[in-house]
Image (cartoon, grey):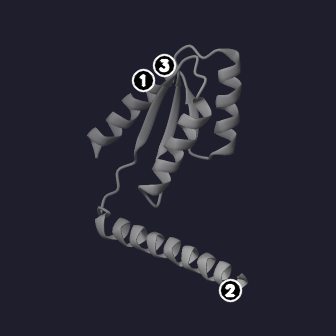
Amino acid sequence: MGENILLVVVLLLSLYGCVELVRSLSLRLLRSRNPVPAILVLPIGSCKELEFIVRAAVSRSRWTSDSPSQVLLLDVGMDEQTRLLAEKMSRDFENVHISTPEELRFYMKRCYNDIKEF
């Protein structure tokens, strides 16, 4: 009985390793020579499912790239509870940031000018 359980655990772990190997190889083969930084902007107002949305976005950004994209929580009327949760999420994940529409506008203008000069 114990041998069967150990065999199942080993098979599951080897399957997970194979999936990670395929993912890593596909990311390396499909990577461009000039990587473009990605920013996922999530407009957040009063949101009860903020934690689920942010965790899903971070998970997706980690799965699709070796260097995770930035997740920007755009404050479009967050209430106090949502704001506290957003601040906690930005502390928990290094690629999650909170921004106002004015800060986003300034950042996008700066990025556009950098690309224009490039």
Rendered location of residue 35, percent (x, y): 35, 56
Q: Which residue is at a point 68% across and 31% down the rendered structure image? A: 87
In the displayed structure, 36 sits above or below 75; it is: below
**Tag shown at residue 3:** 2
What type is the residue that disc 1 sits on? Arg
Please give the label number shown on residue 10.
none
The residue drawn where x is 61% and y is 83% is 7
Q: Classify the position of the N terminus by image quarter.
A: bottom right
Is label 3 or label 2 in front?
A: 2
In the picture, measured across the screen, residue 65 lies left or right of residue 33, that is right
The local crowd at label 3, few if under 14, some if 14 to 19, many if 20 or more residues have their Cα within 10 Å, is: few
In the drawing, what numbered circle is on residue 105? 1
Who comes first in sequence, dot 3 or dot 2? Answer: 2
Q: Earlier in the sequence, mark 2 or mark 1?
A: 2
The residue that disc 3 covers is: 102
Write down the quadrant of residue 52 in the picture: top right
Asked if 23 appears above or below 83 in the picture, the reply is below
Give the number of the mark in front: 2 or 1. Answer: 2
Q: CA distance from mark 2 to mark 1?
A: 60 Å
Residue 118, position in %: x, y?
A: 28, 46
Between marks 1 and 3, how big is the CA–CA gap? 5 Å
Tag 3 near tag 2, CB within 8 Å:
no
Residue at left offset 58%, top offset 21%: 47
Tag 1 near tag 3, CB within 8 Å: yes
**Does the residue at mark 2 contact the one at mark 1 (Cβ under 8 Å)?**
no
Q: Amino acid at mark 3?
A: Glu
Callout 3: SS: helix
Secondary structure beneath label 2: helix
Cα separation between marks 3 and 2: 61 Å
Looking at the image, is 88 positioned above or below residue 12? above
